[in-house]
Amino acid sequence: MTTPAPWARRAALGAAAAAAGIAATAAARSLPRPSAVSLPDPLLDIIDRRRIAVLPLKGVIGGTLRAPDVTRQLDRLRDDGHIRAVVLDIDSPGGSAIESEALFLATKRLAARKPVVAWIRGTGASGSYFAACGATRLLAFPGAIVGSIGVISARPILADVLRRIGASMEVTKTGPFKDLGAPWREPTEADRAKERQLVDGVFKRFTGAVAGARGFDARQLKKVTTGEVWLAEEALGLGLIDGLAEEEEAHVAAQELAGLPRKRIVRIQRRRNLAQRLGLPGATMDGSVWLAELEGWLSAPRLIV
């Protein structure tokens, strides 16, 4: 018998191996494929750390709602890679004009990085509506109060009271407006003109933010900047909000805007000092905060049933 050449043996072995490989591949293809494995939620929470943050904006701005604290929280959320969207849970009558604008600017910075849904739970009036204008989308509970777009400056005049009790004030000042707004004297016409100028200046900044956020022309803007408030259903018709939503729907809107397959919520709590953590009486608000809260809520309509 003739012995095959080495190259022939190698060729035969190669052909046999190829045939075996083809047979194995065909057999593997004929087997049923395993179905997708569904991981348990605790394991998904570890693997997928993408979250939607819910930040409450509750109370009078400049009172219990302190803009410097909230703006720091907003900036941290902006830089947190695990937070993919933010919901602002709003129930506030407004407050300090300067702090309201600071919240608006911080919200706008955050919305430039990731979706922000402003959801008005109860009251979104004046400065809190100003802040909400920085969001990507503005929603409200159907029975919420929305609006109060305007600026007010008020002070008591006690000059007559001081005269009746025989008291007076000795004032040394460096200019005619240094004691502008002082309660111990009647305002002059120049005082009133100066105060009007300040109010109009803040109002222009407020309405500029509203017009930019809501796409209003001059006619539409004039219609909604009368200082009045509306229920959310009316506010929707006026273009002040994007839609009506309950809390869960607001969270879903944030999820959709962020393109997340799952909705995982993390609630941001307000920082508390040691006295507040211990539950000591009066630890939540000092005297000035109490006054700011009282003044703010008294100036906003509250519906009670």
Image: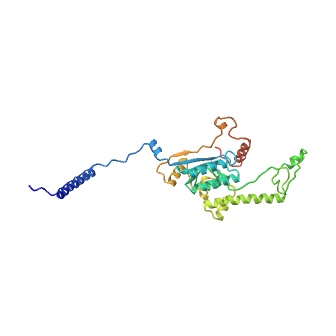
User: Residue at 66% of width from left, 53% of height from top?
Assistant: 102
Residue 218: name its quadrant. bottom right
Specify the quadrant that holds the N terminus: bottom left
Residue 282: name its quadrant. top right
Specify the quadrant that holds the C terminus: top right
User: Residue at 27% of width from left, 49% of height from top?
Assistant: 31
Pinpoint residue 15: horizontal percent, then vertical percent: 20, 56
Q: Residue furthest bottom?
A: 218
User: Residue at 70% of width from left, 53% of height from top?
Assistant: 98
Residue nearer the viewer, 19 or 191: 19
Q: Residue furthest left?
A: 1
Q: Is residue 129 visible?
A: no
Q: Residue furthest right?
A: 166
Q: Is residue 197 visible?
A: yes
User: On the rendered structure, is 51 left or right of 94?
Assistant: left
Pinpoint residue 23: horizontal percent, then vertical percent: 23, 52
User: On the rendered structure, is 11 left or right of 119?
Assistant: left
Colour option used = rainbow
User: Residue at 60% of width from left, 51% of height from top?
Assistant: 75
Q: How many marks?
A: 0
Residue nearer the viewer, 257 or 147: 257
Pinpoint residue 199: horizontal percent, then vertical percent: 74, 57
Pinpoint residue 232: horizontal percent, then vertical percent: 60, 52
Residue 267: name its quadrant. top right
User: On the rendered structure, is 212 left or right of 166?
Assistant: left
